[in-house]
Image: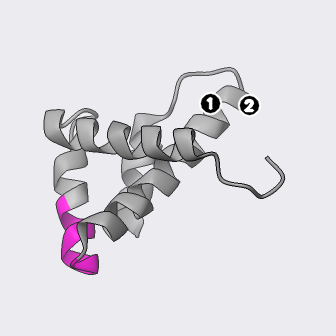
Amino acid sequence: EEGKINPFLHMGLHLAVREQVATNRPTGISSAFKGLLAKTNNKHEAEHLAVECLAEILWDAQVNNKLPDEKLYLKNLLAI
């Protein structure tokens, strides 16, 4: 996208992270997100960190024609 942010994708990723945390799917994301909240003390900033991880996992899955790697996603969230 030539360095430009797609606002629809951006908001969709925020909604996806919120839904994942609310349903704890993948298992463990609620706990991982609580850790991000504790580190940032800011829900929006914590969401942005999670959105970056989610976008990377989804991009990798699309490029490599495979399912998103939930374990790697959680590992990346916990490593922040």
Q: Residue at x 25, y 36 (%)?
A: 19
Tell me the distance, in whole angstroms, between the alpha carbons under discs 1 and 2.
6 Å
Quarter residue 79 falls in: bottom left
Q: Quadrant of the C terminus?
A: bottom left
- On the image, the x and y values in percent for residue 7 come to 56, 47
Residue at 25%, 46% (x, y): give it.
Answer: 29
**Considering the numbered disc 1 on the image, is that residue within a helix, a strand or a loop?**
helix
- Measured as percent of width and height from the top left, residue 48 is found at 42, 61
Residue lying furthest front in this view?
7
| Relative horizontal placement of residue 3, taking residue 18 as reference (left or right) | right
Residue interval drawn in magenta: 34-41
Specify whether residue 1 is painted magenta: no
Color style of the picture: one colour
Quarter of the image holding residue 8? top right
- The image's mark for residue 63 is 2
* Residue type (three-letter) at the residue carrying disc 1: Ala
Which amino acid, by three-letter code, is at mark 2? Val
- Residue 9 in the image, given as x and y percentages of width and height: 55, 39
The dominant secondary structure in magenta is helix
Q: State if disc 2 and disc 1 touch (CB < 8 Å).
A: yes
Residue position for label 1: 61
